[in-house]
């Protein structure tokens, strides 16, 4: 679903456009840097005794050099993201083992990581699975924040998926920075972007 199909406010449309442009620019700059490095070093590289004998190593080095920007620029994640609004059909929580910690991992002390997936039905009636949240599991973690029937909104480039407030709600969560603001306010008090309460007719 495209941004303009949601009739988003101008500032949120701009946020989505800039969010997509940034990783593209980083990717292009990284590739230009890789090309310059290749042009400046290829003669030296392929004239060294070892690389001259095993040119496949030099080829592999430069292939990796040109692939690296795909990972450091974030462009792959950028094109897998999208702006959407829809109704939650089902919530799935996946718990996995997480051994990222400052001390030696053991089976007994391993952290667990919770990942929340939403099955969201959009305005066209299509249901898509969306990963919305992942973190180390904690005793006080609220895993029931999203419920079937909730209307949710995600703006491209943000790490947040928020529940669209109903007319009876008093607070609205910003889709850009995640801060909760009084629903009477039109804009987020932290980042200044329009709150998603406009979907509820506020």
Image (spheres, rainbow, N blue to C red):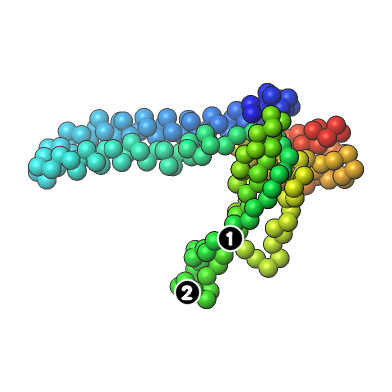
Query: Residue 13, percent across and down?
Result: 67, 27
Crowd band around label 2 with a 10 angstrom C-alpha radius: few (<14), some (14–19), many (20+) = few
Where, quadrant-wise, is the C terminus in this rendering?
Answer: top right
> Residue 157, how many percent across, how many down?
60, 37
Residue that mark 1 sits on: 95
Answer left or right for 125 relative to 149: left
Decide: few, some or many residues near mark 1? Use Cα within 10 Å; few <14, some 14-19, many ≥20. Answer: some
Which numbered dot is residue 103? none
> Residue 105, relative to residue 168: is it above or below?
below
In the picture of the structure, the residue carrying the numbered disc 2 is 106
Q: Residue at the spot x=40%, y=34% of the render?
A: 30
**Left or right for 158, reference 99:** right
In the image, residue 96 lies at what x, y percent? 54, 61
Quadrant location, the N terminus? top right
Q: Position of residue 129 (x, y in %)?
A: 61, 43
The residue under the point 62% across, 31% down is: 16
User: From where the camera sits, is residue 11 visible?
Assistant: no
Front of the two marks 1 and 2: 1
The secondary structure type at the circle numbered 1 is: strand
Seen in the image, is 182 located left or right of residue 154? right
Question: Is 93 placed above or below 45 here?
Answer: below
Examine the image and state in which quarter residue 194 appears.
Answer: top right
Q: Earlier in the sequence, mark 1 or mark 2?
A: 1
Q: Residue at x 26, y 33 (%)?
A: 38
Which residue appears farthest toward the right when viewing the image? Answer: 168
Q: Nearer the viewer, residue 77 or 90?
A: 90
Tags 1 and 2 touching, CB below 8 Å: no
State how far apart marks 1 and 2 are (Cα): 17 Å
- SS class, disc 2: loop
Q: Residue at the spot x=52%, y=63% of the render? A: 98
Instruction: Give the image quarter of residue 177.
Output: top right
């Amino acid at each position: 679903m495209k941004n303009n199909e949601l009739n988003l406010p101008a500032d949120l449309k701009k946020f989505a456009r800039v969010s997509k442009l940034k990783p593209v620019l980083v990717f292009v700059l990284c590739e230009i840097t890789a090309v310059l490095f290749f042009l400046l070093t290829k003669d030296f590289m392929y004239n060294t005794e070892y690389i001259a004998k095993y040119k496949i190593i030099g080829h592999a080095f430069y292939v990796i050099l040109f692939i690296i920007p795909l990972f450091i620029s974030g462009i792959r994640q950028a094109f897998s993201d999208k702006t959407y609004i829809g109704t939650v059909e089902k919530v799935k929580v996946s718990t996995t083992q997480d051994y990222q910690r400052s001390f030696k991992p053991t089976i007994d002390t391993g952290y667990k990581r919770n990942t929340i997936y939403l099955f969201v039905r959009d305005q066209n009636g299509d249901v898509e699975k969306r990963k919305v949240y992942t973190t180390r599991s904690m005793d006080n973690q609220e895993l029931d924040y999203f419920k079937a029937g909730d209307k949710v909104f995600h703006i491209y480039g943000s790490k947040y998926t928020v529940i669209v407030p109903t007319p009876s709600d008093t607070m609205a969560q910003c889709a850009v920075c995640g801060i909760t603001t009084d629903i009477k306010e039109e804009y987020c008090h932290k980042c200044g972007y329009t709150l998603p309460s406009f979907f509820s007719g506020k």
